[in-house]
Image (cartoon, grey):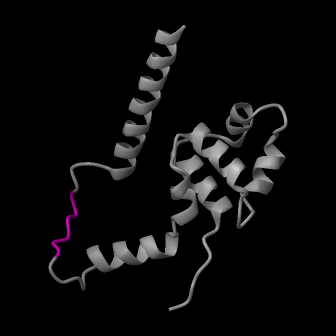
Amino acid sequence: MQNKKIHQGRNIKRFREMLGIKQEALTFDLGEDWNQKKISLLEQKETIEDPLLKRISEVLKIPVEAFQNFDEEEAVNVIANTFGDHSVGYQKNDNPIFNPIEQVLKLHEEKNCAVRKNAERKR
């Protein structure tokens, strides 16, 4: 099996977009050394330095491992093999009662609220 390299910059972009965060907002959270063009270039890099990846992880509140391990092609294959018409042992659900992305965003917002409340208590 071919050892495929994970594109960390593209993963940062995917997660940032799933969270509805614009590049400009990310620059604000990363500090004055950052601008939209620098974020755009970062998202094109295949490998990101660990300290920077950790900082972005803290800002987006997503584990570093998500940027390091997410492989879109693999995820698509799992979904296709699990929910495709040719699958065995799984029932296709054409009318899901929840949207997984909405659930992730809801959990993200709950986590942000808890962090804000905790910060307010410390003041």
Residue visible at 82% across and 40% down in the picture = 35
In the rendered image, residue 92, in percent from the top left (x then y), is placed at 20, 70
On screen, residue 16 above or below 69: above
What main secondary structure does the magenta stretch of the protein show? loop
Determine the image quadrant of residue 13. bottom right
Q: Is residue 83 left or right of residue 32?
A: left
In the rendered image, residue 88, in percent from the top left (x then y), is placed at 18, 83
Q: Is residue 78 left or right of residue 116?
A: left
Q: Residue furthest top?
A: 123
In the rendered image, residue 123, in percent from the top left (x then y), is placed at 54, 7
Q: Is residue 93 magenta?
A: yes
Q: Is residue 98 magenta?
A: no
In terms of depth relative to the viewer, which is nearer, 101 or 96? 101
On screen, residue 8 above or below 54: below
Q: Residue furthest bottom?
A: 1
Residue visible at 20% across and 64% down in the picture = 93
Residue visible at 70% across and 49% down in the picture = 51
In the rendered image, residue 18, in percent from the top left (x then y), is placed at 51, 49
On screen, residue 57 above or below 69: above
Span highlighted in magenta in the image: 90-95
